[in-house]
Image (spheres, rainbow, N blue to C red):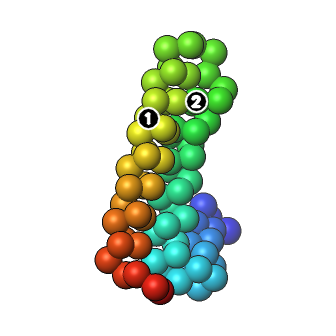
Amino acid sequence: MRLIDVTRRSIGFVTDLFTPVGTIFLIVFLLVYAGVVLPAVWSQHPYRRSAASRMLDLMLRHTHQVLRAIRRQFPGQ
């Protein structure tokens, strides 16, 4: 089986399992995890760790603000 066939079957399986929207969230999560969280934890360079840590803090803070704004739009739900 070729790599492209395996990739297509894997994407089809994930899309069937999580729905297209869930698949997008999964991809975004994996990209953020691989691009921000892992460098914050495992980088040997202190400046990379601190930059990744600041970026993670900034992203979490903004996510919290967005979720708080959404909760204000839909009270009691």
Badge 1 local density, few (<14 within 10 Å), some, or many (20+)?
Answer: some
- Give the vertical position of 12 relative to 30 (above or below): below
| The disc label shown at residue 43, or none | none
**Three-letter amino acid code at the position of disc 1:** Met
Query: Residue drawn 42% across and 55% down?
Result: 63
Residue 40, compared with residue 20, is above or below; it is: above
x and y percent of residue 30 in the render? 56, 54
Label 2: which residue?
A: 40
- Residue 7, horizontal then vertical, whole percent: 58, 66
- Taking the image as shown, residue 61 lies to the left or right of residue 15, namely left
Residue at 48% across / 38% down in the picture?
Answer: 57
* Between discs 1 and 2, the one toward the N terminus: 2
Helix, strand or loop for disc 1: helix
Q: Are marks 1 and 2 in contact (CB under 8 Å)?
A: yes
Residue 36 vs residue 53, the one in the foreground: 53
Q: Nearer the viewer, residue 39 or 56?
A: 56
Q: Nearer the viewer, residue 32 or 13?
A: 32
Left or right: residue 70 versus residue 3 is left
Residue 39 position in % (x across, y down): 57, 30
Q: What residue type is labelled 2?
A: Ala
Vertical placement of 47 versus 28: above or below?
Answer: above
Task: Pick the quarter of the image with the N terminus.
Answer: bottom right
Residue 56 point in image, percent of width and height: 49, 39
CA gap between label 1 and label 2 equals 9 Å
Q: Name the residue under label 1.
A: 55
